[in-house]
């Protein structure tokens, strides 16, 4: 479950340089992956409540709003803390 984004707004110039985004939520596991407008990103699992990604022009081509969600593949072992998998609801990241 995704609860918040930090920051919730970034400038496009930050994205051009590479902007770090923290996704806060719950029940994240080692295979959880952040998506931006359905494009999966290389995701660092900081903890079961926090994920970290780098935003670049490869996924954000200009100012506007993008949808950020978390996808966890199904069939994970219980040792990862999750067996069902699924997609979270999306939060909106504003790019100025």
Image: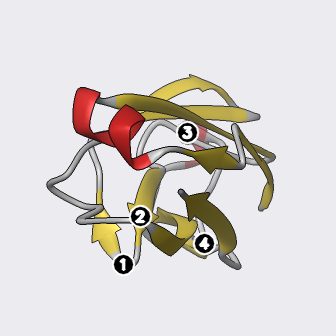
Asked if residue 71 can be seen in this view, the reply is yes
User: Mark 1 and mark 2 in contact (Cβ < 8 Å)?
Assistant: yes
Q: Residues within 10 Å of mark 3 (few under 14, many from 20)?
A: few
Q: Nearer the viewer, mark 4 or mark 1?
A: 1
The one nearer the camera, 85 or 37, is 37
Residue on which disc 4 sits: 84
The one nearer the camera, 55 or 30, is 55
**Percent of width and height locating residue 59:** 24, 61
Q: Earlier in the sequence, mark 4 or mark 2?
A: 2
The one nearer the camera, 16 or 46, is 16
Please tell me which residue is depicted at 55% across the width and 39% down the height of the picture: 80
Give the CA distance from mark 2 to mark 3: 20 Å
Tell me where residue 62 sits by quadrant: bottom left
Residue on which disc 3 sits: 80
**Percent of width and height locating residue 67:** 54, 74
Q: Tag 2's secondary structure?
A: strand
């Amino acid at each position: 479950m995704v609860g918040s984004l930090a920051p919730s707004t970034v400038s496009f110039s930050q994205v051009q340089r590479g902007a770090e985004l923290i996704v806060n939520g719950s029940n994240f596991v080692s295979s959880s992956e952040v998506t931006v407008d359905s494009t999966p990103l290389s995701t660092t699992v900081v903890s079961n409540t926090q994920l970290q990604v780098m935003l670049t022009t490869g996924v954000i081509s200009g100012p506007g709003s993008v949808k950020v969600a978390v996808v966890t593949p199904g069939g994970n072992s219980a040792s990862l803390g999750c067996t069902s998998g699924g997609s979270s609801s999306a939060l909106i990241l504003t790019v100025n």
